[in-house]
Image: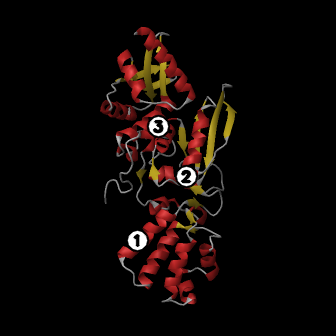
Amino acid sequence: MSKTPYIRNEGDSSEVNIKISLKNYLLKLDNNKYVRKGSDNIRLYGLGYIIKTIYVDIKKYKKIRELEEDRKRDHQTYSNWISDKTGISINELYELCKYWKKTCKKSNEDLKTIWERIYKGSNYFGCTNGKKIRLPKFIDYKLCYLIGVMLGDGHLADPNKSYDNKTSYNSEIRITDGYKGTFILLRQFFRDLFDYYPNIYSELSKTGRRFYRIVVRSKPIHRYLMTICNVPTGNKIDKVDIPKIIKILPLKLQKWFINGFFDSDGCARLAKSKYPEISISQKKVKILNSIIKFSKNVGVNWNGPYKTDSGRNHGYVIRISNIKHVEKFLNVFSSLNPMKIKDRGILWQEIEHLK
């Protein structure tokens, strides 16, 4: 199997217009290892016209009673799928396609063709209950940025660790920040990518400090971020690194992952109130080394990693303190977080003053 089976190049040279098409990921999305009961299956909607074609073909070779016995599904179930009254799980539709191939004496190429047709026609995903979700069939700067934020301030629940006694699959997605304005753009990205607009929640920490978060409970989005986008689940301290799907992208898109990660865990400040400095701190060094390596490809050089052990900050940090290198970083990497934009503006003012 190819090392990159879910991606192929496509798009133009402008950063915000580059779109990399994802190869058919349906079976990966509905892998049986994540299904503990029927409600855990990811279902497809809006494919009644294709299911009808398959159903009509099969009836040329099988009586309805035989089809029902073979597939353990009654006529009403097929009627509901065809009329789009209910969705059909990805796994079940694939098994139906294989049954169609065998019954109607179709070729492997016929099976591949109809499965690609299903992939291209599958616009909305869901479960037995819950909101229907759109899942991207491409990766662009918005998705790269969001993945970067998830690796920084985000949390993707371990699907095996339930938050209550009733949930068989934990689908919780959280992004937390101390500034409410952070979520204005992130919410829009969720809407653009998934047709889902999350709410913003406000809470007080144990020290009385207010923070904000968006919480999404959607199996399709969770499964997509976990299996297609390679976002680690559960406690991610030892897992934080540039995901595989990002590493195989053009540099102009990889950069947007770094932008999102920096907007979450990076810092742009005036050291000692007068020296422009860029830094990123992490508990583990792995992603810092990856960022250093990537940055060299775009002409940005970091110092470090340095081990840190001050106050609550135990881990590693990389820095850029040379004014020319700070300026290079600001020119190459972008910020979409309002607070980071403000901090960068302060650095630009000081750089202009020092010139």
Q: Amino acid at mark 2?
A: Ile
Q: CA distance from mark 3 to mark 2?
A: 22 Å
Disc 3 residue type (three-letter): Ile
Q: Position of residue 96 (x, y in %)?
A: 49, 76
Q: Position of residue 347 (x, y in %)?
A: 47, 17
How is this picture coloured?
Answer: secondary structure
Q: Secondary structure at mark 2?
A: helix
Residue 159 visible, this orientation: no
* Label at residue 221: 2
Q: CA distance from mark 3 to mark 1?
A: 42 Å
User: Residue 158: percent from the left, percent from the top?
Assistant: 53, 49
Residue at screen point 47% across, 12% down: 350
**Quarter of image, res 331:** top left
Q: Secondary structure at mark 3?
A: loop
Rendered-image quadrant of the N terminus: bottom left
Q: Write down the residue under mark 3.
A: 237
Give the residue at mark 1: 113
